[in-house]
Amino acid sequence: MSASAPRCELTVSQAEASAFVPVDLQQPLREYEVEMGLIIEAPVFKEGNKWKFHDGQTSFWAEIADQSFLAQVDSGAVRFGKGDMMIARVRVSQVTGLGTINTQRSIVSVVELRPAMQQQQMF
C-alpha cells in the first residue's frame, strides 16, 4: 500500500465566502484612444466579426463599434475598394497575464474614408 498525502478539510463560513473569488488572469494594463489612418485589408460583413486593417507597420483585426458607419455600409451608402484608407478613432486596450501582453483594438468612430491613390496616365 502506498502512502498518500494527509487529507485536509477546511470549512468556510458564509461571511468568509466573499473572499474566495476567481483570479482574473488577464489584468488591464493600459487603454487609450488615438486617431489614425488605416488601410482596409479585409472587410467582414457578417455582424459581430472583426475586420482586418493595416496601420503602416502591422496588420491586425479590430471590431467596428461605430454603428452609424456599419449602418451606412449595410445600406450601400458607403462603398470602398482595394487600397482605400480609413481615418478612424481607435481604442487600444492592452491586457497582461501569465507573462504575456495582448493588444485589442476597436474602431470607435470612422472619421473619413479616402479612396486609394490612383496612378495618373502620362500620355
Image (cartoon, rainbow, N blue to C red):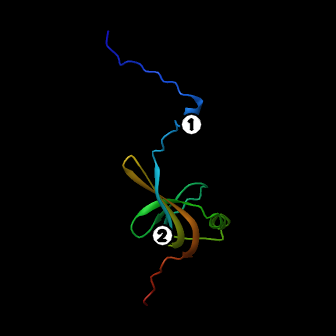
Mark 1 or 2, which is nearer the eye? 1
Farthest-out residue, left: 2
Foreground of the two, 94 or 16: 16
Q: Which residue is mark 2?
A: 39
Foreground of the two, 69 or 99: 99
Q: Name the amino acid, label 1.
A: Ser
Q: Name the amino acid, label 2.
A: Ile
The residue drawn where x is 41% and y is 70% is: 56
Q: How many neighbours does mark 2 have within 10 angstroms: few (below 14), some (14-19), or many (20 or more)? A: many
Give the mark nearer the N terminus: 1 vs 2: 1
The N terminus, quarter of image: top left
Is disc 1 placed on a helix, strand or loop? loop
Q: Which mark is residue 18?
A: 1
The C terminus, quarter of image: bottom left
The residue drawn where x is 66% and y is 64% is: 71
The residue drawn where x is 45% and y is 45% is: 25
Give how far across and how far down residue 62 sits, in percent: 51, 60
Give how far across and how far down residue 40 sits, in percent: 50, 67
Give how far across and how far down residue 122 sits, in percent: 42, 89
Farthest-out residue, top: 1
Measured in 3D between alpha carbons, the distance from the residue under mark 1 to the one under mark 2, in whole angstroms, is 48 Å
Q: Is residue 92 above or below residue 26?
A: below
Q: Is residue 87 above or below residue 122?
A: above
The quarter of the displayed image where residue 95 is located:
bottom left
Is disc 2 placed on a helix, strand or loop? strand
Residue 22 horizontal side relative to residue 122, left or right: right
Q: Which mark is residue 41?
A: none
